[in-house]
Image (cartoon, rainbow, N blue to C red):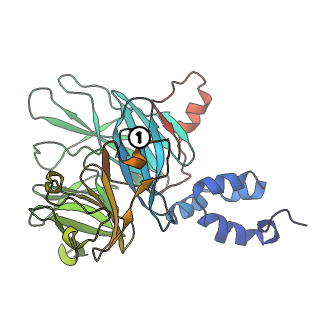
Amino acid sequence: MPDTMLEDLPEWLVVDEILVRLPPKDVLRCRAVRKSWCGATSTDKSILDNHRRQPSLPIVEHDEGISCLAATRAQKILRPIVRYSPDPVSNIAFCDGLLILSRQSSFYICNPATRKCAPLPRPPLRPGFRAPNVVAFYQHDASPREYRVLWVFSAHMARRTRYFVLPVGSDQPRCIQWPTVLQSYPASCDLPPVHHRGALHWELSLGITVLDTVTETFRHMNHGGVFSLFDLGGDLALRHTSGDCLTQNIWVLQDYDAETWAFRYRIDLRAMEVSPPLPLDFADAYFAPMMAVINERELLIQHGGDRLLHCDIESLFLGNVESQDHESSLNRFANSLSLTMHRLQESMISLPLFEMQEEDAMNKEPPFIIVL
């Protein structure tokens, strides 16, 4: 008699149709059940197929750490990913379920789903420039899977910047030239690029700057007005907030090559019957609300510093977002809350740096705790 229902099913069905759809943490538990399952779910193809089936979840920062929206729940709640111990970290960047964090001049790369973490090598310091900052974190190509970080050095006195690409784990940076002179560089923690069609996209004052992640060359896209760029279910989208910060208009890129945009929908906070009501005449209302997409119909909207709203594209209020971490003051929204432009799509992807870290018994603990 089989011990479980899964063991009564054909091996191919379990691996190709069931395990591939489970969250990474559940797949890792299943690997301990049967040796053949461990082998089948450890291939590059299986890991990539599983990653593609995971939901892309909005990221929220707060005083105590980083959280994401919990998937597959009617009532949306926040699930902790990382807790700071004890001071906040910075330089957040996400790619393929991997996360980059920093504390002062030390950088770390980790996979929250597998709880693997390792120090991340950075480019060497340059005379006359500040310590480097992360601009982007991306996959260079599909085979072999190589991840790279775009770093920036800014000068102490003049408005000079230098950009370098460094493969994760390498110590050989390569200088690349940003195509325009910027008032300030787009740090990943504040303005992460939007990944779309094998390229990174930044919405800057002069339009949209695009970096091809294979050739690592830049180009420019045009758009009119002041917008925020984001991913809308696989489409490149623009969000414009009204002057009173009460309405948001959403456009979607209809033709990528022709650079034509089409209006999609409008979110109006005045039409939303929120409980408790929003103080629309309060000072917080005059700071542009952040917005993140859950799926093609549902959204998160941050209003002020302590309200995270769950609504749909027709401005229908669906509820307030609470925290799964009852030990945290976040579930009372007593501390600073920031809905970011980052997203987490969990994976079982590993890196040579993780294996090297496991072999190094003298390594230093990172200044945060992975709790996903």
Q: Find the residue positioned furthest to the right.
A: 1
| Residue at numbered disc 1 | 65
Label 1 crowd (10 A; few <14 / some 14-19 / many >=20): many
Assign the N terminus to one quadrant of the image.
bottom right
Residue 354 drawn at (x, y percent): 55, 38
Does 81 appear above or below 103?
A: below
Judge whether 166 appears above or below 242 on screen: above
203 is higher (above) or lower (below) than 335: below
Q: Does any portion of residue 127 appear in the rendered image?
A: yes
Residue in the image at 28% along x and 68% along y = 236
Residue 201 rendering spot, x and y as whole percentages = 25, 58
Q: Residue at x 21, y 46 (%)?
A: 186
Viewer-closest of 296 and 91: 296
- List x then y, in percent, for residue 282: 15, 54
**Residue at 28% from the left image edge and 54% from the top image edge:** 193
Residue 171 lies in quadrant: top left
Mark 1 lies on a secondary structure that is strand
Q: Looking at the image, which is closer to me, 96 or 216? A: 96
Residue 169 visible in the shown view: no
Residue type of the residue flagged with mark 1: Gly
Q: Residue at 56% across / 52% down in the picture? A: 348
Rendered position, 211 above or below 249: above
Left or right relative to 302: residue 79: right
- Residue 367 percent across, percent down from the top left: 45, 30
